[in-house]
Image (tube, grey):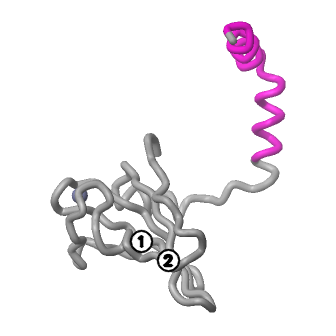
Amino acid sequence: MNDDSVIPSTGGQPDLRILAACPMCQTAYHPLKTRVVAERGDAHLLYLECRHCSSAVVAIVTAGTTGLESVGALTDLTRGELAQATTEAIVSTDDVVDLVDWLEHNVSVQLTLRREKANF
Ligand SMILES: [Zn+2]
């Protein structure tokens, strides 16, 4: 994902506006263009594509004790790319430790970081 922007939260208050209309052009979403990409418990990962401007929003909708809550972000992922990302292996703690170890011991990474620091 690049150039994504998070749609502002409403401070914990239920706000399902992101599920109703495109945040870019305000066109109402067509229900048939909305897809549930993944589900886990009471949480649903939705992909909403605007039929007018073709922008897309990925949103997580959860059913909690206070009702439905959602958070969404604009995305340039296609529905297929999002579905693929949800089925790929989960990054483990060991993966992160291995990456940090590799970054700390990779000569070209360290040289790049030193050059970046020198430029500031
Ligand atoms: Zn739109």
Distance from the alpha carbon under mark 1 to that under mark 2: 7 Å
Question: Viewer-proximal residue, 77 or 64?
Answer: 64
Residue highlighted by disc 1:
46
Residue 91 location, quadrant: bottom right
* Residue 88 image point, x, y percent: 56, 59
Mark before the other along the chain sequence, 1 or 2: 1
Is 25 located above or below residue 31 in the figure? Answer: above
Residue highlighted by disc 2:
61
Which residues make up the magenta segment? Answer: 96-119
Residue type marked 1:
Leu
Residue type marked 2:
Val
Residue under the image location 16 percent in, 59 percent down? 52
| Label 1 SS | strand
Q: Are marks 1 and 2 in contact (CB under 8 Å)?
A: yes
* Residue 85 image point, x, y percent: 50, 58
Q: Residues within 10 Å of mark 2 (few under 14, many from 20)?
A: some
Magenta span: predominant SS is helix
Q: Is residue 33 left or right of residue 2?
A: left
